């Protein structure tokens, strides 16, 4: 008589980072967080960690957005969970970008300790008043950006160096000639 040992169901560990519009309201961010939690539960996954990283500058503009609210989610589940989560994120207007990576394969969910405090979605704070919001004209490129004095200074320095006027190399050569005399 053979006895088969049933192994516990295995899962994969994934990380998803999604970016919300910078001007997202607190209740809209909560709706997205609720949807993410709902999808993970519905497909049989388990959240293991959630972090709200806050408003940050994007590496490159996404659409017309230059800033966004980053949210990091780590969870256990299968490939169908990732597909369903990304499908839901794609449908939400407040989500401008997302990416999922597989961290580990063949994880036993029973062995993963989860602290209830680490799986709570933090509230998203409204944009600070000191952050200048772009007007519609600026977003569309109809109004020129204010001049950047540092950029002008750098451009002048580069021009002078190319001409040989007042460059550091020229000054060093003059000092060496004076020392030889």
Image (tube, helix red, strand yellow):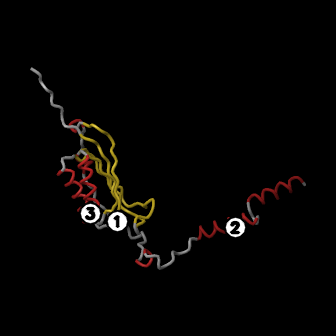
Mark 1, residue position: 21
Q: Which residue is mark 3?
A: 91
Q: Position of residue 77 (x, y in %)?
A: 24, 45
Residue bearing mark 2: 159
Q: Secondary structure at mark 3?
A: helix
Q: Nearer the viewer, residue 163 or 176?
A: 163
- At 75% from the left and 65% from the top, the residue drawn is 166
Residue 169 vs residue 85, the one in the foreground: 85
Query: N-terminal of the two: label 2 or label 1?
Result: 1
Q: Quadrant of residue 128?
A: bottom left
Question: Dividing the picture into quarters, in which one does residue 102 lie?
Answer: top left
Local packing at callout 2 (Cα closer than 10 Å; few below 14, some 14-19, many 20+) is: few
Circle nearer the viewer, 3 or 1 = 3
Q: Secondary structure at mark 2?
A: helix
Q: CA distance from mark 3 to mark 2?
A: 50 Å
Q: Nearer the viewer, residue 145 or 42?
A: 42
Q: How many marks?
A: 3
Sequence-wise first label, 3 or 1: 1
């Amino acid at each position: 008589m053979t006895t088969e040992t049933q192994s516990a169901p295995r899962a994969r560990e994934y990380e998803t980072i999604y970016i919300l519009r910078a001007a997202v309201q607190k209740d809209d961010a909560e709706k997205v967080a609720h949807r993410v939690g709902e999808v993970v539960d519905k497909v049989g996954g388990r959240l293991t960690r959630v972090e709200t990283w806050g408003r940050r500058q994007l590496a490159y503009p996404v659409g017309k957005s230059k800033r966004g609210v980053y949210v990091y989610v780590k969870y256990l589940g299968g490939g169908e969970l990732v597909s369903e989560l990304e499908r839901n994120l794609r449908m939400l207007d407040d989500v401008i970008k997302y990416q999922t990576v597989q961290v580990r394969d063949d994880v036993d969910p029973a062995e993963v300790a989860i602290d209830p405090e680490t799986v709570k979605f933090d509230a998203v704070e409204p944009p600070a008043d000191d952050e200048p919001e772009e007007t519609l004209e600026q977003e569309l490129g109809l109004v020129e950006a204010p001049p950047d004095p540092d950029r002008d200074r750098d451009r002048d320095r580069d021009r002078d160096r190319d001409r040989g006027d007042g460059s550091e190399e020229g000054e060093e050569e003059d000092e060496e000639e004076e020392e030889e005399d």
